[in-house]
Image (cartoon, rainbow, N blue to C red):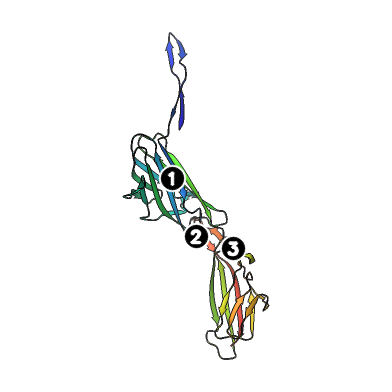
Amino acid sequence: MAIFNNFATLSYNGGTTNSNTVSGEILDTLSSTKIAVMDDYTANDDATYVITLLNSSTTPMSGVTITDDLGGYTFNGTTVYPLEYTAGSVRLYINGVLQAAPVVTAGPPLVFSGISIPAGGNAIIIYEAAVTAYAPLAADDTITNTAVITAPGLSTPVTVTAVIQTEDRADLTISKSVCPAVVSENDQLTYTFVIENHGNTSATATDNAVLTDTLDPILDPITVTFNGTTLTEGTAYTYDRTTGLFTTTAGQITVPAATYTQAADGTWTITPGTSVLTIAGTV
């Protein structure tokens, strides 16, 4: 809503006089909110947004346009966009009833146009956007996504914003290799497990990571190292020489957080944190 004040001036015979000041209020005919269905994100994630429009006037409102900045921010003198509209994802509801999709310009910026809202009615627009390589990923980073709503007869554009934050957690993957690939009986065989953390938070002992593998062929005796340090059987791991079942103690495996580097074009590169466990033994 907006308060206005004004007065008139009367000039005569070289003099002037002012009228009294009158005041009034212009009620907002269109109000809006914007929310993210999930308030956090990771690399290569998707975000779902909901924009609600309420027409409180006694006349229908047509020609409503929503312009969404897809979280654009300035980097090295240019605008980069951490979000990208997912084609075909938009859904438009008028007073709760699904309608034909509005006209979409994917952008950036993303534009939804041709929306009409009945008198005293509402419109809900739901759409998805993919997280791009321009999205910051370090702990507590955010994407601020702003939409501006305009329409004929609307004196002031309506602006709504939603903020999502990185999901601060470890994100582990594991790969396994064997050397040599061809081995004779009573020779040495080494299994190497590379554990990578693509998340922005370290995997610590409290995360209780456990590596389990049934070695085939069974190795005996074995030597186990973690990041170059020899582990003690019974304390850091257990090993069944009958079945070949190998299991690390919960919390033994820790992996540092990934690091993130922003290139000159604004894209982010992930360098995963890495830990290495090896099991060497006789076939």
Q: Is residue 154 left or right of residue 21?
A: left
Q: Which residue occupies 38% across, 44% down?
A: 123
Question: Mark 2 vs mark 1: which is more N-terminal?
Answer: 2
The picture quadrant where one finds residue 199 is bottom right
Residue 89 vs 116, above or below: the answer is below
Spatial CA distance of label 1 from label 3 is 34 Å
The residue pinned by badge 1 equals 147
Q: Which residue occupies 49% across, 60% down?
A: 43
Which part of the image, by quadrant, shows the N terminus? top left
Q: Is residue 282 left or right of residue 94?
A: right
Residue furthest left as drawn: 100
Residue 122 vs 28, above or below: the answer is below
Residue 32 vs 265, above or below: the answer is above
Residue 78 in the image, given as x and y percentages of width and height: 47, 49
The residue pinned by badge 3 equals 257
Give the SS element for disc 1.
strand
Question: Mark 1 vs mark 3: which is more N-terminal?
Answer: 1
